[in-house]
Image (cartoon, helix red, strand yellow):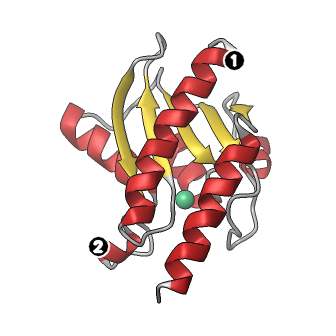
Amino acid sequence: MFTQEQKERLVRLCMTEAELAGKSGEDAFGALLVDKAGAVVFSAHCTKLQDSDRLAHAEINLLRHACKTLHTQSLEGHILVTNAEPCSMCMSAAIKTKIFTFIYGTAQGRKTRPSISAEMVRDHTANEVTLVPNILAEETREQIEYWRNTNSAGG
Ligand SMILES: [Zn+2]
């Protein structure tokens, strides 16, 4: 697994993706697909508004793009990095593509519906799922809140 420094570097890259989303009026969520060596393979951010798609979470966009581009349904051996704890939909989607390691920022970045935590998804998965939460927890939470407030104020 990566050093703390590597994990923070990756989560900061997610924050850069999240910034792009926030500036477009979207929820400030970003995701990276990373290989075992720590190299970023793909990145994506939330595009719910742009796509008129409630399912266009950063992670779903990332998984779809990666599978389509690599012509595969398996992203085994890769790691999903996000600036916030993935929702249960995205956790499930990632596990379906054989991603079993998740590195993320704040666990309090979103109010998920249904309220099924990453831990709960992990505990209901036959494979061993590794969660590495709270990387830059404060910074990631503050960024999400900043854009939530800014975008809701702007209408
Ligand atoms: Zn999600």
Measured as percent of width and height from the top left, residue 135 is found at 70, 34
Q: Secondary structure at mark 2?
A: helix
What amino acid does circle 1 point to? Gln
Relative to 124, is 140 on the left or the right? left
User: How many badges with numbers are in the image?
Assistant: 2
Q: Nearer the viewer, residue 152 or 90?
A: 152
What amino acid does circle 2 point to? Asp
Q: Nearer the viewer, mark 1 or mark 2?
A: 1
Measured as percent of width and height from the top left, residue 136 is found at 70, 37
User: Which quarter of the picture shows residue 43?
Assistant: top left
In the image, residue 114 above or below residue 61:
below
Report whether residue 124 is seen: no
Taking the image in four quarters, ligand 1 sits in the one at bottom right
Q: Secondary structure at mark 1?
A: helix
Mark carried by residue 39: none
Instruction: Determine the residue positioned at 70% across, 27% down.
Output: 128
In the image, residue 26 above or below residue 125:
below
Badge 2 is on which residue? 51
Q: Nearer the viewer, residue 96 or 88?
A: 88
Badge 1 is on which residue? 4
Instruction: Determine the residue positioned at 41% across, 72% down.
Output: 25
Instruction: Determine the residue positioned at 51% across, 55% down.
Output: 29
Measured as percent of width and height from the top left, residue 21 is found at 40, 60
Report whether residue 73 is seen: yes
Q: Nearer the viewer, residue 29 or 102?
A: 29
Q: Earlier in the sequence, mark 1 or mark 2?
A: 1
Distance of label 1 from label 2 (alpha carbons) = 35 Å
